[in-house]
Image (cartoon, grey):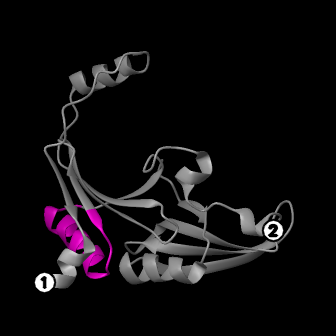
Amino acid sequence: MAYHHLAFAARDINATHAFYEGIMGFELVKVEVTPLIGGGWGKHFFYRIDGDDSKFIAFWDLNDTAYQNAHEYNLNKAGKLPDGTNHFSFEVDTPEALNAARDRWNAAGLDVLEVDHNWCHSVYTRDPDGNMVEYCLTTGRFTPEDRAHALAMLTETEFKPTPAPAKIKPWPAKIAQAQ
């Protein structure tokens, strides 16, 4: 079973639209306007991912809600969690697609962090609300040993770090602008 959509509130729907359609390349295909539980109303914007009519990311533009000006839209700040804990990750199928995503973000004036996790390769940036967004390419296969280790970690109480990433490289936005 796969997910249908992930939904999040957005501080500025126009900035969110510019990022998710203009930079990420997801197409806005549907908006529902509805009253909200607890008062107020919202516009629920659905962005189709990669032309797939069964995979979306959605954003709420909230109006007339209680504590309207006190909402925190960065998921980690709202949850008082370490930066990057909650994030959005999107799949790419090739190294070329991963590099193209990195270059597109840089060209749009965004800082990018590239990490080879030894089993997947990722690039990260931030959306207009400060939430971390990732494109990820799976590069490894999962073994029975990986599964046994994962199950053992469910009850492990000591810090036993995995091997360090094979590569960590920042791509500051100014690099792309200087080229």
Residue 174, x across and y down, in percent: 23, 77
The residue at the far right in this view is: 39
Q: Which region shows up in magenta?
A: 93-112
Residue 23, x across and y down, in percent: 37, 79
Q: Is residue 177 above or below residue 149?
A: below
- What is the quadrant of the C terminus in the image? bottom left
Q: Is residue 85 above or below residue 154?
A: below
- Report the front residue among 66 and 140: 66
Q: Residue at x 23, y 23 (%)?
A: 144
Locate residue 95: give its quadrant.
bottom left
Residue 111, x across and y down, in percent: 30, 69
User: What residue type is disc 2 on?
Assistant: Thr
Q: Which mark, by number, is residue 166?
A: none
Locate residue 110: give its quadrant.
bottom left
- Report the front residue among 22 and 83: 83
- Is 109 magenta? The answer is yes
Q: Is residue 11 above or below residue 71?
A: below
Residue 29, x across and y down, in percent: 53, 81
Locate residue 161: give its quadrant.
top left
- Is 125 magenta? The answer is no
User: What is the crowding at mark 2: few (fewer than 14 residues within 10 Å), some, or many (at least 20)?
Assistant: some
Q: Residue at x 18, y 42 (%)?
A: 165
Secondary structure category for the residue under label 2: loop
Secondary structure category for the residue under label 1: loop
Q: Residue at x 83, y 64 (%)?
A: 66
Q: Which mark, by number, is residue 65?
A: 2
Q: Would you name the residue on which mark 1 appears?
A: 179
Q: Is residue 16 left or right of residue 137?
A: right
- The Cα–Cα distance between marks 1 and 2, rounded to whole angstroms, is 45 Å
Q: Is residue 155 above or below residue 141?
A: above
Q: Are marks 1 and 2 in contact (CB under 8 Å)?
A: no
Q: Residue at x 37, y 21 (%)?
A: 153
